[in-house]
Image: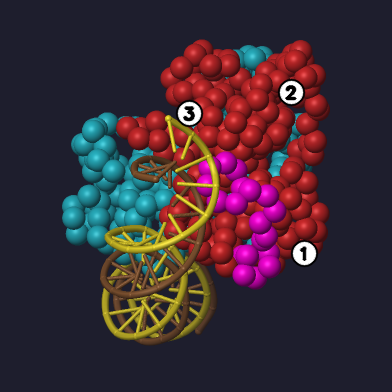
Chain colours: A cyan, B red, C brown, D yellow
Amino acid sequence: MEISAVPPSPLADQVRHHASGARIHEAGSAGSAWRVVSGAVRLDAIDGDAVFAGLAVPGDVLGAESLLLGHCHFRATALLPTVLTPWPGAAPAQGTFLLGALARAEQRTARVVALRAGQAVDRVKRLIQLLVPEAGGGALVQVMLPPLRDMADITALTCETVSRSLSLMRRQGTLAAAGQRRGRGTKICRYRLPATDAAA
Amino acid sequence: MEISAVPPSPLADQVRHHASGARIHEAGSAGSAWRVVSGAVRLDAIDGDAVFAGLAVPGDVLGAESLLLGHCHFRATALLPTVLTPWPGAAPAQGTFLLGALARAEQRTARVVALRAGQAVDRVKRLIQLLVPEAGGGALVQVMLPPLRDMADITALTCETVSRSLSLMRRQGTLAAAGQRRGRGTKICRYRLPATDAAA
DNA sequence: CGTCTGCTTGATGAGGCTCAAGATCAGTGG
DNA sequence: CCACTGATCTTGAGCCTCATCAAGCAGACG
């Protein structure tokens, strides 16, 4: 529980890198807690087979329960090339620090839950916006997309429907390939953010 | 799976009661944090109109962000007759205490997200099981149901579909009315828990 | 007693799931 | 350098579930 004093900005030797698709920790294993610096992580409840249970994006905390119980509840898998830093790293893990993580977790829940309502194309767009590092109105930003299988699990759609949604977005000019083509590895795309008034 | 099964019962003068449908706090207002003792609470993000953002059941913490920021992010509404107690109470809001709340929040996310995948009847069943205070295999338990409108928002279905799902469950003997009839007020029903092996 | 709110049920159509085939690409070994 | 394999993605056809629209009913409440 008690806290080692570590500077707030993760130094180069205090981070861990994971490739897209890499397992970060297994459910039930003795893991430790991390904060996501960049990338995205998928959490799964292991109930016979894996069931999508949550998402962590930069700033979020991973495996906080292991500090309390000594083991992780969820399987964590990198959706994109992901950088983690030990948590709690900075300052005292008390008061404001933990409260901030709690507040952030609630907001993450709200956005993840919202990824599973509405029309297919809108869900996929919302997911992409969650993965866009920066945020601005109407801008054309670069974004990495996880495999279709993961996008489907997160949005509660099928691979086919996600693929069709992305195709539609390309036809409409909302999305454009910008890096690798198809096949293994994370896709890099350009995505046009909707106007700030956020219609739907 | 669950962190602590039964939350400690607070003294009678340290609780607040809310009727079904009552507003607990408004988004953006200066609220305070509460722990749910019994009942259930719905959280909504206010984005023009209210969008379902989360659920709190006994043991969960409500409005933790107000301790940090001074105001609430979400609107909180009682889904059932609900009892709350101030949080953190006498205990210090540090260490294990906050970590427990964080771990619990992650587990709640997993279950709420699961309420929005799969067939309609299964979603409704899962929601009812989330509202059942006690848990046992194959038993016939008493449970209060929130208004259809809320069940629909939570499961990302429509009122009509939820109503049809409940009708089907009644025809199949999974659910039976046990208190008030239709009209205003929370419905009381008997619900047959599925066998512990939990076949989806 | 009339109105209002919440619940139920039916008819119909659309959106997404299922099944299936083909395309593209990374890695491997000849 | 190229064929082969396996994984991922794309696209099509048909069906099914659920959303939508609509009507009717039961209690609550003034």
What range of the chain is rendered magenta? B169-187
Secondary structure, mark 1, is loop
Quadrant in which the N terminus of chain A appears: top right
Secondary structure, mark 2, is helix
> According to the image, label 3 marks what residue?
B75
Question: Which chain does the numbered disc 1 sit on?
Answer: B
Across the whole image, how many numbered discs are drawn on residues?
3
- Between discs 3 and 1, the one toward the N terminus: 3
Disc 3 crowd, CA 10 A, few/some/many (<14, 14-19, 20+): many
> According to the image, label 2 marks what residue?
B97
Task: Name which residue lies at 55% across and 51% down.
Answer: B182
Quadrant in which the C terminus of chain A appears: top left
Residue B114 seen in render: no
Q: Are marks 3 and 2 in contact (CB under 8 Å)?
A: no
Image quarter of residue A157: bottom left
**Camera-nearest residue between B150 and C22:** B150
> According to the image, label 1 marks what residue?
B195
Left or right placement of residue B133 versus residue B127 in this view: right
Task: Name which residue lies at 73% across and 60% down.
Answer: B192
In magenta segment, residue B182: yes
- Between discs 3 and 2, the one toward the N terminus: 3
- Residue A8 at x, y percent in the picture: 56, 18
When the figure is inspected, residue B92 is found, relative to residue B134, above or below; the finding is: above
Residue B156 seen in render: yes
When the figure is inspected, residue A27 is found, relative to residue B105, above or below; the finding is: below
Secondary structure, mark 3, is strand
CA distance for labels 3 and 2: 24 Å
Disc 1 crowd, CA 10 A, few/some/many (<14, 14-19, 20+): few
Image quarter of residue C1: top left
In magenta segment, residue B128: no
